[in-house]
Amino acid sequence: MRRGYRVVAFARGSGGVTEGVEYRRYEMDSEFGPQALAGIDVIIHAAYIRWSRDNRDAAERNIRATRSLYDAAVQSGVRVVFLSSLSARENAKSQYGVQKYALERMLSETDSLIVRAGLVVGDGGLIRSLYLSMRSGFIPLIDGGSQPVQVIGTEDLAAAIALALEEGLGGRQNVCSEEIIPIVEIAHSMAMQFHLRPRYISVPWGPAYVVAALAERLGLSLPLTTENLMGLRAAEPERPSSALFDLGWRALPWATLLPALSFEPKAA
């Protein structure tokens, strides 16, 4: 909206209340035709059905929904941006990485822009899970928390997408910081920022995975899911997009993003 774009959000339910945003209903398992994209020039596809033991057909549903969305976009003359992840790779360990990679491969044969984002710094995902964990008094660090992480702020992510579209970029673009920071450093700095003094507990990867899997079977919520653990274990540094660098884009480092980080209570 700051760049003068009209924003339409496709969401489940009745939508939201963000000022200046038009909401339209969208369910990934529902039929999606060209008429749903009336008045739209670009669609950013970030929807994703998470794999779980009770949702084992997630991969097929994600492929089907993404293909339906892309076909509708082609018929409507709409450009597609697919929001992927640095964890998407051929040898990915997590279902998230495996499925995102499969969707990347499907769209790589099209004119879609594939944005491979680092760890998004905002009120959600792994960052929020870390915050809630330290609020509870402890942080489990897998093998001491040495896993390498590259971050991306929400504003930098939006700016990268807008710049890529304005400059006609396509294909895979890595959108992340040049800086590589271990997860333990992220946890320590967050605790200091929010004046918290949690206990740091180093847990070997194997037992951590067993506990997380058992908790998921029992319907319990832990700071790290089996998907988080698999993704962290397979984390590998990536080079940010050279095409975006040539256009002057840079991602802010963790230390600059941290002071603006805030968390709001989630509705029950």
Image (cartoon, rainbow, N blue to C red):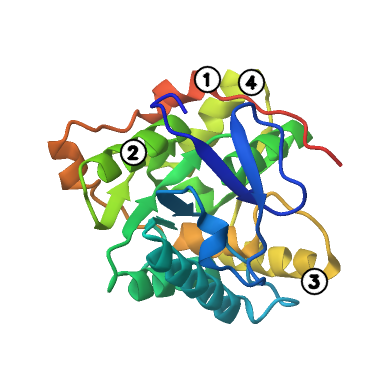
Residue topped by disc 3: 217
**Category of crowding for the residue at label 4, using alpha-carbon neighbours closer than 10 angstroms: few (below 14), some (14–19), many (at least 20):** some
Classify mark 4: helix, strand or loop.
Answer: loop
Q: Residue 58, position in %: x, y?
A: 62, 75
* Mark 1 vs mark 3: in front: 1
In the image, residue 10 above or below residue 77 = above
Q: CA distance from mark 1 to mark 2?
A: 22 Å
Q: Mark 4 near mark 2, Cβ–Cβ under 8 Å?
A: no
Q: Sequence-wise, which precedes: disc 4 or disc 2? A: 2
Q: Is residue 199 left or right of residue 189?
A: right
Q: Is residue 180 visible?
A: no
Q: Splitting the image into 4 quarters, where does residue 60 fall?
A: bottom right
**Category of crowding for the residue at label 2, using alpha-carbon neighbours closer than 10 angstroms: few (below 14), some (14–19), many (at least 20):** some
Residue topped by disc 2: 162
* Mark 1 vs mark 2: in front: 2
Q: Sequence-wise, which precedes: disc 1 or disc 4? A: 4
Q: Sequence-wise, which precedes: disc 2 or disc 3? A: 2
Q: Sequence-wise, which precedes: disc 4 or disc 3? A: 4
Q: Say which amino acid is labelled 1.
A: Ala
Q: Is residue 259 left or right of residue 211?
A: left
Q: CA distance from mark 4 to mark 2?
A: 32 Å
Q: Mark 1 near mark 4, Cβ–Cβ under 8 Å?
A: no
Q: Residue at x 67, y 71 (%)?
A: 30
Which label is found at residue 22?
none
Q: Say which amino acid is labelled 2.
A: Ala
Q: CA distance from mark 1 to mark 4?
A: 11 Å
Q: Quadrant of the C terminus?
A: top right
